[in-house]
Amino acid sequence: MPEPIQNQGHTKKKRVAVVGATGIAGQQFLVALQNHPWFEITVLSASSRSAGKSYEEALRSSNGQVHWWQYEPIPPAFKNMLVQNSETLDLSQIDIVFTAIDTDAAKHLEPIYAAQKPVISTASAFRMEADVPLLMPGVNSNHAALIKTQQKNRTWKGFIVPIPNCTTYGLAATLAPLHQAFGVKSVLMTSMQATSGAGRNGGVLALDVIDNLVPYIPKEEEKVEKETLKILGILKNDAIADAVIGVSCTCTRVPVTDGHTETVFVGTHKPITVEQALTAFREYQSDCAGLPSAPKNFFQIHDDPFRPQPRTDRDSDGGMTTHIGRVRLEKVLGGIKYVLLSHNTKAGAAKGAIFVAEYLVSKGIIKD
Amino acid sequence: MPEPIQNQGHTKKKRVAVVGATGIAGQQFLVALQNHPWFEITVLSASSRSAGKSYEEALRSSNGQVHWWQYEPIPPAFKNMLVQNSETLDLSQIDIVFTAIDTDAAKHLEPIYAAQKPVISTASAFRMEADVPLLMPGVNSNHAALIKTQQKNRTWKGFIVPIPNCTTYGLAATLAPLHQAFGVKSVLMTSMQATSGAGRNGGVLALDVIDNLVPYIPKEEEKVEKETLKILGILKNDAIADAVIGVSCTCTRVPVTDGHTETVFVGTHKPITVEQALTAFREYQSDCAGLPSAPKNFFQIHDDPFRPQPRTDRDSDGGMTTHIGRVRLEKVLGGIKYVLLSHNTKAGAAKGAIFVAEYLVSKGIIKD
Amino acid sequence: MPEPIQNQGHTKKKRVAVVGATGIAGQQFLVALQNHPWFEITVLSASSRSAGKSYEEALRSSNGQVHWWQYEPIPPAFKNMLVQNSETLDLSQIDIVFTAIDTDAAKHLEPIYAAQKPVISTASAFRMEADVPLLMPGVNSNHAALIKTQQKNRTWKGFIVPIPNCTTYGLAATLAPLHQAFGVKSVLMTSMQATSGAGRNGGVLALDVIDNLVPYIPKEEEKVEKETLKILGILKNDAIADAVIGVSCTCTRVPVTDGHTETVFVGTHKPITVEQALTAFREYQSDCAGLPSAPKNFFQIHDDPFRPQPRTDRDSDGGMTTHIGRVRLEKVLGGIKYVLLSHNTKAGAAKGAIFVAEYLVSKGIIKD
Amino acid sequence: MPEPIQNQGHTKKKRVAVVGATGIAGQQFLVALQNHPWFEITVLSASSRSAGKSYEEALRSSNGQVHWWQYEPIPPAFKNMLVQNSETLDLSQIDIVFTAIDTDAAKHLEPIYAAQKPVISTASAFRMEADVPLLMPGVNSNHAALIKTQQKNRTWKGFIVPIPNCTTYGLAATLAPLHQAFGVKSVLMTSMQATSGAGRNGGVLALDVIDNLVPYIPKEEEKVEKETLKILGILKNDAIADAVIGVSCTCTRVPVTDGHTETVFVGTHKPITVEQALTAFREYQSDCAGLPSAPKNFFQIHDDPFRPQPRTDRDSDGGMTTHIGRVRLEKVLGGIKYVLLSHNTKAGAAKGAIFVAEYLVSKGIIKD
């Protein structure tokens, strides 16, 4: 059991703004940051439609329903907090900005914030920019060094670090130890994604997934294929050289609330056995253990072939572990195949972004 | 539109026995054979527990519920028909036996029946025997010639022809035109299977699939991998030479009542484009058109990338067509990838077995 | 079996406009009117956003998905029909207008249409107006006489006849024979409503009903309570005197696509036995038998206490019958209790409106 | 906040046996008793089929799946504990017996256990016996006095105290304050029950509740109607006089894993307003506060009319609170109507039984 990592010797909590606080991911930030040992929310912001209202009123839909979808109640401290306008945010009293907004808004707003402050983003807007690391602590932590390049390039005091797509998360995490030890050559993945991933506006309708599934999620496959290569890439000379792996995905939506399941077929350069693969997963050294949001076990390996299952497994270890089951030899590609499960709205969204911020604080990249 | 194929000039309907008539597949036989132009059920049989009861009483569970799970009501003609004991069946007045029983029962009973009469089976017991064709009309119809070998080997007057596993069905059907035109080299498939496939006893519990999926179906992947090679194999010298294709599957269970969805990644020997693949599917010549249970279109191709979906598409064309959507280039394997949907309890079970019987009648292999 | 009622001796089909053709109810009109023996759609209209597009293009959402949610494909005849603007509709070549629009739009548009033509409406806007019948053929057919009063009052050449709320439909239908024979005194009803009832915009989100139910549907209970009294009321002196019955409801939303289930507790003025209730249901004389959309059986009575169930029963008899099960004595209220099921988007919406139009044509109230 | 009640000054934990440990309710006992401050499991027992196996092996089904359905993993302490035979249990080293077995087994086994030790039962076998209290701490705690009568009648050293049916639980709890303050005259209730209530063997099949609900649960309504009257009855002269209330129920099964929802219509003897009802719920004094399993709030009242909902609310307060929402005037009966939610496998089963045991220990009725 690792020693808890300290908040860099500071006793004062860092002040954070949650931008896009009324959406599903925004709500998750509130839950995850409630009682956080290092961070405290001091600003909530949203679009002009919500600005000026109390947080609870901003959640109220036209039929009177308060659209709060988390298992935990609205943290009382935020219920009456005034929602600010994301367009005109004053960041002078803020140490970190978490954004949970859509791509178009992110393209416009995040550079404005980043000119002044560190921005950890759940949006895809900047993920594929050359000077932007797509950071997964414990997987490609060293990519954080690219932040300096970014700041120099763009003459920003702050920076933007996006987290990967929620479907990329589990795939990249589980490929990391395999790539390290055996060299991954090819990956064919089919995802069975939860409905919470589609968010609050434009969310998945009940009619689409009762006794049904939808075999397509627009733009998802392309994101997963590209992001995986960048995350597993190598940083040298202030640039990331993408990993050279053939990645092909089919992404589907299934009648599950939370938790993305993926079936993965992996071909490796070096020969691999099931035992070797299990050992690689079990002995994988993540350099993020001890951070407040780090899972106790980076991977949870299941012997029971009927596991992992979304409902029973997604929340274990705070929703921050990646589950791996059914590890078998993959004879067609020459490698292994397995099933993974990760929590798309915890590890794959708000909590994952907070985890990144913790890492950057622990390394002194985010300072006071 | 092909001419309807006639019942070999016979005006009298063939008399059929449904063995295992009380299970889910057995019930489907009753629905599918109600008003069939060529066949009429004259015997229903089940285990000794049900024998001697009326059909409706045999369906009653211990809590009083009549366990009939079809959308159509119990065909009135069968409600009060006496259920016979499958162990002591008199087949003298029967032309065809349809079996819907489990593997162990099939191993024991089907040879007894086959000694006298044609047996079309939904069980897996004899699927992989060397002298048993795994028949899919329109895909490997010529394998029917193996029946003679079987009869000679075993000195049977009748024979056993099993239909493939419900998950194999859609995969083998869609691979057939690709294999014919481009040579299939490798197949990686993930299935998202409906709960009806698990049958009535030992069925999937609600607790297992509400807000959940199960990433494992015992023995399913092995069946699909082997059966596909046999179906796509070549009959010569009274034996089937399996197709030489690398096939690897992951089979999962999802919260859908009927309709198996499969994501398929295919590598081909010859280069292939999306247009060529679509043409191969569209122009595929099935030699079974015009049979009473044949679908109007062997394949239904979807342009809308959100389709096929189980609830809205499974029942089209009597549940006997195979749906294909999302045809795209597969760069990792060198080939194409797509999503298929087929009806596991229609095309993939009872109705599929009836389709086989119709084919054998039309070819004169089943005679009076 | 009643004689089919004729289209009043006319061989030419009546030309109908479907207003709000792109919504869920609008789509159902297209399916239900395809191949209708009396009516043919000649105009489709929608809001200005859709006007000028082909019907299929008007259904396309921002992510490219064609939002067509019916089991049947888009009737080919309408795919490329130009959608007109509901605000500027030319009704000169139209015989009947079917509206499937929201309340606010209905308040504004329906009087404009009704000034010229018969309007059969699925909206609630005019349901409770004194000179507007809330017509259910077979239940209160004689209320149609109020149409003349309405035309006189409002100096309209046409008129508005709304159909009841989809939840009222089954309740009022099943109370009718009881009220006739025993006098209904009190009704306590709990509904378990399907998600399709909430429509396409503002539809029920998957997150709201996976492993969940929602115990509230805004404004629904009030509608059901009021509409039931009007439907069961008596027309005299050109006005409807509401039935004097205590009605109290709780309306909930459950994870079902189609089919509203209601548990009903009824107190009666005269003593009643279960046998008498069953007889009243069985012998109920509907005066609408033989109309093209009339169910073969106005009620379907279930002996099996596990029925009716939405998935297996909703579609029987074209989705136009009302299912009744579990008829038992109700000792607290002094009466009977039962469970009903009716198809909310067939009997309770588009098909129900067409049924009303058929009735009015058969009675000569809608003429050429 | 009440003072925690102590384990009657004893520092040693009481040793408990869980009989029927492999079923769903039995599994819940293991989870709920793990780390319990007063009780520790020292014996697990099941039928002869499981006896002699390790607990984990006893859970393994014929297809190899370990049938453990709880969110928490199998408590490691029990994984390898040897399962004993319930028929031949040695209770000499046991202080309390918890039973989670079916009615027939309970009829036979519980008296044998009760001859020696206190038995807290989730089975219905003895609930309606005259000298058996149907105990709900905080609702009818004083009925515990009947235990002495039972011991005298039956010359037992121990006793049997059953908990009510899981559907009765929420109904009786919410009626208690209303009955106390206003006198309840009539109750009409419709339940929408979770699938976990049906247990592991004979559990609800997925095919029964996907896109569906079942409007009947055998024997459930009778249980709820009778048990409610006994729980709300008055103990005098060593006997319980049932409450005089008209109770009528319709019980249905819906696609929800855990959490029973009930819509309740209540008529009262004294006039009642919504405000008075809310006050009665809010100010209700439970005499069980401070027990280890007692909820912080006996009731949780919801202002948001869309709540309570099973998925988001069932687990709050350890699954031991009863949720009340949508409190409105009930004009037909003269009273109020509301919606309740309680956790059928926590408050309504294992945890509820443990709660009873805690109460009896705190009152000195269960001693060392």
Image (cartoon, coloured by chain):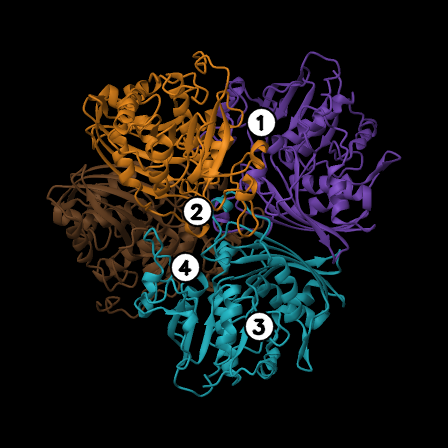
Chain colours: A purple, B cyan, C brown, D orange
The residues bearing labels 2 and 3 have C-alpha atoms spaced at a distance of 37 Å
The residues bearing labels 4 and 1 have C-alpha atoms spaced at a distance of 42 Å
What residue is pinned by disc 4? C31
Disc marking residue B331: none
Letter of the chain that mark 2 sits on in the rendering: D
The residues bearing labels 4 and 2 have C-alpha atoms spaced at a distance of 43 Å
Seen in the image, is C175 located left or right of residue B361? left
Residues marked 1 and 2, same chain: no
What residue is pinned by disc 2? D201
Q: CB of mark 4 within 8 Å of CB of mark 1?
A: no
Seen in the image, is B341 located left or right of residue B58? right
Amino acid marked by disc 4: Val
What residue is pinned by disc 1? A21
Amino acid marked by disc 1: Ala
Amino acid marked by disc 3: Met
Looking at the image, can residue A68 be seen?
A: no
Amino acid marked by disc 2: Asn
Q: Residue at x 74, y 48 (%)?
A: A274
What residue is pinned by disc 3? B136
As helix, strand or loop, the secondary structure at mark 1 comes to loop
Q: Position of residue C229 (x, y in %)?
A: 21, 41
